[in-house]
Image (cartoon, helix red, strand yellow):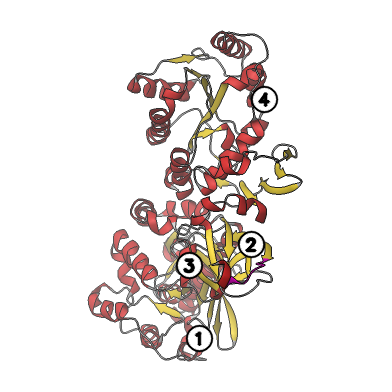
């Protein structure tokens, strides 16, 4: 189906891809120059290349949208060009017609783009014409738009509207040109004002287009780095409209983004805004701690505050906590309280995003932040408090307040080891922590039973593949010699000399070998890709995928099975996308083996 568009990299719903235009490959996110629509007829020609197949959805929308709502003056020649291009579209690019109606309301903006993206197959590009500005372009791409154009930049140029990254400025109100593009660095604002109207319009239009071009480049860099969400949170600040769009997306389009958000990245996650609390990564972590985590049986639950350094274990404060409780660790289960992730069991501290987030630390917590973290703690305690004999909280300030609020609500007795105004790492507080723990354990001899390494591998496997997978992976079977090699955080699990799994701290994931995957195969049904009758060499492309579980997300560890091969690798697109796409890499293969017997006899 898609001969002309291929997605190469994803960051949430945003994509880097290649669109073939007139024999030339153009990278998306793509800024189409309005001139090219008429001059070379490039776009139109390519779009004619296959039988025009104008989706009913968009036909309908042509009648649906009131013409009066269109931003572009209909008499303008550029408008006709865009309009002419619309019906000529076929299967590789869809144009959201009368997109300017999106600007009527944030809700309309969200509804129409998400609706369009959901209605068309994933490996087709979506072009939202005529509304892009340097201000809104990052959000458009974040939502899954692939192509924009400079219509708005040019039209506004003709209207004397000088665009800036945060919106637009009236040329008459400016004292200086706040830009270094080729136009703005060659003349002053007075000189620009003094130009005749046609020259001035051309110059401003050129500046506006260059500014938009720069923005597109920035977005590409953020997609490559996996940081577009952070950039969008920053960008929407300039406009209540765009901020409202992002908030609506987070609340109302959770499913759309959940399907597209990778399980892990090799990139830090900045949680600097209120919107960060609503990120898929945050919600996913919190729900997996409840659904895919089984706390070990320990006498004491110890609640600790987070640290700036990640993983927490390597931070100076956590080294001190550890020193205080070392002797009793076999009896203690450690949970770290943090914003925005809520509760992080010690065993999951290496998991994405627990080892990857960064937050502004001031000691003051917003009500929303406090409510969210309290709700995570409450949910955890409601489920697990009964398994502990005693809960100890080595917390102060906002952490302590929210903990005591939750404990009161649930009528749970908590021992606090930090007094009002006392630092958690102060000698007095650490001494109190040590003494209280010793008292509660009722023994001063070193208590054994603390199994850090297997506990961590078990919890990470459960988190990634579902409850039970971890036990299956790390439980020794008869005749097996099990070993965990490596220094924290690079643990490697092997049985009889064969590696089963290793922690990949760069991604906060557990990577399986084929032996490891086959050992826990019964737990991998949600992470299985069925491939065709071939032996993969290199990556598995989407057309080679026969079926894939819909739960698979980008960067998930997957097992792939076909008539001729079985292997493990990392998903490069969601399972749903593997099935719907006809192009692009579906799985990066790590290990593959020929299946010995013919499929007919094994299946
Ligand atoms: Zn400029």
The image shows residue 255 at horizontal and vertical percentages of 38, 56
State which mark lies toward you, 1 or 3.
3
Magenta-span inclusion, residue 23: no
Badge 4 is on which residue?
319
State which mark lies toward you, 4 or 3.
3
Beta carbon at label 3 within 8 Å of ligand 1: no
The image shows residue 487 at horizontal and vertical percentages of 74, 37
Instruction: Note whether residue 266 is visible.
Output: no
Mark 1 and mark 4 lie on one chain; the one further toward the N terminus is 1
Magenta stretch, main secondary structure, is: loop
State which mark lies toward you, 4 or 2.
2
Please tell me the numbered disc located at residue 36.
1
Magenta-highlighted residues: 594-599
Q: Residue at x 54, y 11 (%)?
A: 440
Quadrant housing residue 87: bottom left
Badge 3 is on which residue?
577
Mark 1 and mark 3 lie on one chain; the one further toward the N terminus is 1
The answer for how far apart the CA atoms under marks 2 and 1 are is 47 Å
Task: Give above or below for 583 relative to 228.
Answer: below
Badge 2 is on which residue?
567
Crowd around label 4: few <14 · some 14–19 · many ≥20 (10 Å): some
């Amino acid at each position: 189906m898609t001969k002309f568009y291929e997605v190469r990299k994803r960051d949430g719903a945003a994509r880097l891809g290649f669109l073939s235009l007139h024999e030339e490959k153009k990278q998306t996110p793509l800024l189409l120059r309005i001139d090219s629509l008429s001059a070379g007829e490039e776009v139109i020609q390519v779009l004619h290349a296959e039988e025009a197949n104008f989706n009913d959805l968009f036909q309908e929308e042509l009648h649906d949208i009131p013409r009066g709502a269109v931003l572009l003056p209909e008499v303008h020649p550029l408008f006709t060009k865009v309009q002419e291009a619309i019906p000529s579209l076929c299967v590789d690019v869809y144009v959201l017609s009368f997109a300017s109606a999106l600007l009527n309301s944030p809700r309309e903006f969200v509804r129409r783009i998400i609706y369009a993206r959901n209605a068309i197959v994933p490996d087709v590009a979506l072009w939202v014409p005529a509304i892009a500005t340097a201000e809104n372009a990052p959000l458009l791409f974040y939502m899954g738009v692939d192509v924009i154009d400079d219509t708005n930049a040019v039209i506004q140029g003709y209207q004397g509207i000088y665009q800036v990254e945060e919106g637009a400025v009236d040329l008459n109100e400016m004292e200086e040109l706040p830009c270094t593009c080729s136009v703005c660095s060659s003349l002053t604002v007075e000189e620009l004002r003094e130009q005749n109207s046609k020259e001035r319009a051309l110059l401003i239009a050129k500046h506006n287009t260059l500014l938009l071009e720069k923005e597109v480049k920035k977005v590409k860099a953020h997609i490559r780095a996996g940081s577009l969400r952070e950039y969008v949170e920053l960008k929407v600040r300039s406009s209540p409209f765009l901020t409202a769009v992002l908030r609506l997306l987070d609340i109302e389009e959770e499913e759309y983004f959940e399907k597209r958000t990778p399980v892990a990245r090799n990139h830090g996650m900045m949680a600097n805004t209120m919107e960060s609390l609503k990120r898929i990564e945050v919600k996913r972590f919190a729900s997996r701690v409840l659904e895919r985590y089984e706390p070990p049986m320990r006498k004491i639950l110890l609640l600790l505050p987070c640290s700036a350094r990640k993983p927490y274990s390597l931070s100076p404060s956590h080294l001190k906590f550890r020193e205080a409780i070392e002797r009793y660790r076999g009896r203690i289960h450690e949970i770290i309280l943090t914003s925005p992730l809520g509760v992080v069991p010690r065993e999951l501290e290496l998991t994405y995003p627990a080892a990857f987030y960064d937050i502004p630390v001031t000691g003051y917590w917003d009500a929303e932040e406090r409510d969210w973290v309290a709700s995570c703690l409450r949910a955890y305690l409601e489920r697990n408090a009964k398994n502990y004999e005693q809960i100890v909280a080595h917390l102060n300030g906002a952490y302590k307040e929210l903990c005591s609020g939750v404990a009161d609500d649930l009528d749970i007795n908590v021992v606090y080891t930090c007094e009002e105004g006392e630092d958690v790492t102060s000698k007095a507080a650490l001494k109190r922590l040590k003494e209280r723990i010793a008292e509660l354990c009722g023994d001063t001899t070193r208590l054994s039973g603390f199994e850090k390494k297997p506990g961590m591998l078990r919890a990470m496997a459960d988190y990634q593949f579902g409850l039970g997978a971890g036990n299956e992976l790390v439980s020794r079977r008869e005749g097996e010699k099990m070993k965990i090699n490596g220094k924290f955080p690079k643990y490697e699990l092997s049985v009889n000399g064969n590696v089963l799994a290793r922690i990949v701290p760069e991604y906060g994931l557990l990577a399986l070998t084929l032996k490891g995957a086959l050992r826990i195969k019964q737990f991998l049904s949600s992470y299985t890709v069925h491939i065709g009758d071939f032996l993969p060499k290199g990556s598995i492309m989407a057309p080679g995928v026969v079926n894939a579980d819909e739960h698979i997300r980008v960067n998930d560890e997957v097992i792939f099975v076909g008539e001729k091969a079985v292997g493990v690798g990392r998903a490069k697109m969601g399972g749903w996308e593997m099935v719907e796409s006809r192009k692009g890499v579906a799985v990066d293969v790590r290990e593959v083996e020929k299946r010995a017997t013919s499929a007919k006899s094994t299946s």
